[in-house]
Structure formats: C-alpha cells, structure tokens
Amino acid sequence: MSKIHYDREHHVKKATDVGDPQCFKGEAGPAKFKVGDRVRVRDLPSLFYSRTMVYARGAECTVAELVYESPPPEDEAWDNCDNPEWFYSVIFNQKDLWPEYPEAYASDTLETELSERWLELV
Amino acid sequence: MAEKHKAAPMVDEISDFEILEIAVRELAIEKGLFTAEDHQLWSEYMETVGPLPAARLVAKAWLDPEFKKLAVTDGVKASLEVGINWITDMPSHFGTPSDYCNLRVMEDTPTLKHVVVCTLCSCYPRPILGQSPEWYRTPNYRRRIVRWPRQVLSEFGLALPEEVEVRVEDSNQKSRFIVLPVRPEGTEGWSEDQLAEIVTRDCLIGVAVPKPGKTANDKRPVHPAINPVDH
C-alpha cells in the first residue's frame, strides 16, 4: 500500500505574500445576492464547526456589502479550500434579533458577515 | 536568613489556558511543526504591535477627505500610509488563522455609532491595534454588547441619545474592524499629531468617543487573582 500524500502546505503556498482572504479573489464565481437584497439567515445543521451565530439564525437582514471571497469556515476548519464562496456583510435590525429590544431604540442595528450558503432571499 | 528569602512572583496568577499553551507549544516544537526560533519571531512581532498606527489613521482621515474615502473603502491599502502592511508585517506573510488581512474602517456619523465585538472568540485587528484588552475577550462583554449595547456602553461611561443609531459590528469571519469616530468639537486647527493623541484604543473599539484633553483609556477594574500563584 502506498502512503497517501497530503499537502499540508497548500494554503501557505497560496497565501504567502498575497494575504488571506485576498488569495481566493475571483474563485467564487458570480455572486447570488446584491447590495440591498433582503435575505434570511438559514438554520442549517452545523456539525463540528460553524461561525454562524445561533442568535442570527432565521432572522431577516439586508445585504450591505459584498466583502470578499473565501472558503466557508465549515470547510476551512478541515483544511478544505476547494469551494470558495462570496461573503456578505449583512445588517440586522436589533428588534429582529431580540424581541425584547426596547422600542425607544428601534433604529439600532447589528452588522456581521456570512457566507453565501447561509443566506436565502426573503 | 538566606533560606527564608523568596523572590517576588512575576505574575499573580497563571491560568489553565496559559499552562495549556505552554504544553501545546512545547509539543509542537518537539514534533517539528514549528521551531523555537519561529515562536520567538512571532512573540517578538506581537510585542511590537500597538494602537498608535490606528490612531494615526483616524487623525489622517479627519484631516484629509480623500484619505478618509480610501480608509472606508480599502482599509488594508489605507493602513500602508500609517506604516502597517497587513500582509507582509506578520512573520508568516499572510496572516494567521486568526489574523486575516481584511480591515474595515467603520465611519461614525452624528447619528450612527459603531462598536466592535467578536461574540464567537476574540477577533481583533491586532496588526494595527495591538493586543486586545482583557475585557474585550471576556464572555461578559462578548455576550452582552450584542444584546444590550446601550447598557454596556453606559457602563463604559458612554450614554447615547435615542436619535443615535447604535450599530454593533460582530466580527465573526475574516474582516477586522476599527471605528472611525466623529471628530470632536474643540479640535479646530489641530495638527495630525495632536489629533492622534486623543484617539485612544477604546475610541477605536467604539466604547468611547474622543474628547480634547483625554489621551488615555479609562481605568478598568482590576480583580484579585482567583487562584494566586503559590510561591
């Protein structure tokens, strides 16, 4: 049986002197959402690793910016860089995240970033 | 008498995480994942970073509208003008699993106030802002600032009126954030050096606003060691 060779330095070679996430630029293909789109955070199962906060799941938000392309953290945690996605900066109204948020501060917001797989059009 | 002498402890407390770090580091060196020299190089780099370049960036942005435009659209490029190269400054030349090379500069206005947190861990723009303060990394700050931002800000001494929108930046992915606060009144005609002095680390995280004459962060409470070093 031949020994399986796994290149543990593939990311280092790709990112050195380019930067991460810069090294994935142009790899995600066309973006599914555009600035201003109303989207909802999907409640996908997240076994092992995810960076989608529980408080954001199921909540509606607005796309504020397309920020960069990168493998999603669910893949990257396993050193898998094969499927980069667009990342979106999204803005929630605090009232949509915390039902008890005071009415007096109805204009307060929260901004965070999520990868494409976590969003769906409302 | 000599046998009774004990040197003063260098730290009050060593946490379980510090012991774990030493154990993992020594194992990694033993296994050849990195060398002791690599570790020293990184530690020395981390000693050199601090909040001054970020303060300079804000002062420059206040004085130069063109630079402000660059800062809010491309934070990494704007950082070059204050001597920070997000990609090549770090010994790895690409960042680390927690220091990614994407800086976003969030501009406050008289009706919008940003405040930065990382609810999932403690992501922080270290190349331009140095090591995060201890409170930034505590579960207390991380879990409360997203849900009760105004209450937490008021604990920092920052009470904001209703007409100001508070926007929490949860830095959960590869962007790192600093806040570009509103230039305060009473700073007309100031030089870049004078302006940079009042942009404290707390202003850059967003839990304080710059004030003429205020050049240091407020003192945070220091709690006694829970498990003092047995010396």
Image (cartoon, rainbow, N blue to C red):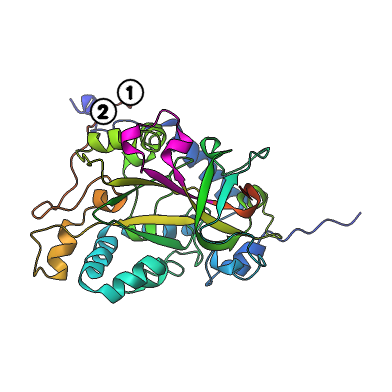
Residue highlighted by disc 2:
B223
> What's the amino acid at mark 1?
Ile
Give the image location of residue A9, x and y in percent.
Answer: 65, 62
Locate residue B159 relative to residue B152 in the image: left or right.
left
Give the image location of residue B220, x and y in percent.
Answer: 22, 36
Residue A50 part of the magenta segment: no
The magenta segment is A92-113
Task: Reply above or below: A61 against B1.
Answer: below
- How far, Cα to Cα, is label 1 from label 2? 8 Å
Residue highlighted by disc 1:
B226
How packed is label 2: few (under 14 Cα within 10 Å), some, or many (20 or more)? few
Between B52 and A26, the residue placed more toward the observer is A26
Q: Quadrant of the N terminus of chain B?
A: top left
Residue at 50% x, 64% y is B92
Residue at 44% x, 64% y is B90
How many marks are shown on the rendered structure? 2
Between B184 and B15, the residue placed more toward the observer is B184
Q: Secondary structure at mark 1?
A: loop
Give the image location of residue B70, x and y in percent.
Answer: 36, 72
Between B157 and A49, the residue placed more toward the observer is B157
Between A11 and B103, the residue placed more toward the observer is B103
Chain of the residue displaying label 1:
B
Q: Quadrant of the C terminus of chain B?
A: top left
